Amino acid sequence: MTRAADLTLDRVQTGDVVPELAHDVTATTIVLGALASRDTRPMHHDHDFAVNRNGIRDIFMNTPNQAAWFERYLTDWTGPKGRLGRMKFRMRESVFPGDTMVLRGTVERVEVDATGCGWAEVEVALTVDDVVCTTCTARIAVPTGPDDNPWRRRGDDWRP
Amino acid sequence: MSTIETTDLPDDVTALIDVVQYEERGEFPVERGYVWTTCASVENGNPLFWDDDTAAALTDGPITPPTMLSVWFRPHHWAPGRTKVALPLQVHFDLKERLELPEAVMTDNTITFYDPVRPGDVITSSQILRSISPVKTTKVGTGRFWVIDVEYRNQDGALVGVETYTGYGYRKAGA
């Protein structure tokens, strides 16, 4: 796959747009995501339960798998040295088979904290047909230079 | 309706604020099979999770995707002799019952990541009630907001993550 090679903080500015990610969601997407997150609740794999018991359109993507999509989206952008510090989710609408979900992010803030750790705050929206289903405010550590590695930080040097 | 301040909470509920409850050990050691299945499910090619040389260079060996934190606490779908499964966020359900608020929604979820979780780790979680609001009326009913932290620690006691949930327990208007 194509990946940005180790993004560094000097290449990040407020207002930058993180490259868009689009994915055609199938029943397999939903069920595999639920299986991977050990979630056996029927609304994530049983169409009949979802429609006739829950009264919704179909099975839908669970929250942990959405988090995994957000993580993949952000680290596709940063490269493997990007280290997530914090994610805040707001769930509004569900994601169903047949949807094309699109993740779009904008850098809202760039900073270097008191320990010298570089951070980007990114506001990401997961949309389907331009309707916002989930938003995620992510704080992700980005190396300040080619020799920096946020994964080395421990204890008081890591302030997510 | 009048606003009831937090001090009007039952004493036994107030006493629970900042108290560690429901400490629970994961049912199995963290393992890479779920890491690869998760990465496959979202087509995540991050070499940290697929390439041991990259993991050795950047993180001193394999780690798990940070967003998998809650995965290590989902109970087995079945286990011999089990009669009851503890609900995730039991404190939330306790508050609903104690405060007689039959409906509830989660309004907010924040995950903060600390030390990486590694294959072989055994993670322990605990639930801590952080705050309860005065009675508030919203468009869905009347009730209280509460904030619950779920702290995750590895077998060495190191903090690996905190999930913070804001819940709203309420009674529907007219109910």
Image (spheres, coloured by chain):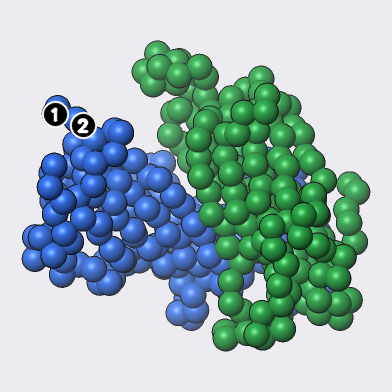
Colour in which chain A is shown?
green
- Residue located farthest toward the front when viewing the structure as drawn: B2
Q: Which residue is mark 2?
A: B172
The span from disc 2 to disc 1 (Cα, nearest Å) is 5 Å
Give the blue chain's letter: B
The secondary element bearing badge 2 is classed as strand
Residue A24 x/y as whole percent? 73, 27
Residue at figure coordinates x 76%, y 60% from the top left: A14
Q: Is residue B117 visible?
A: no
Residue sitting at x 46%, y 72%? B153
Residue at which label 1 appears: B175
Amino acid carrying label 2: it is Lys
Locate residue B128 relative to residue A130 in the image: left or right: left
Residue A44's x, y, as percent? 50, 30
Q: Amino acid at mark 1?
A: Ala
Report x, y in % for residue A31.
Answer: 58, 31
Q: Where, quadrant-wise, is the C terminus of chain B in this rendering?
A: top left
The foreground one among A35 and B169 is B169
Task: Give me the residue at 86% from left, 71% from top.
Answer: A10
Please give the chain letter of the residue carrying mark 1: B
Instruction: Characterize the local packing of mark 2: few (<14), some (14-19) or many (20 or more) Cα atoms within 10 angstroms.
Output: some
**Does A130 appear above or below A66?**
above
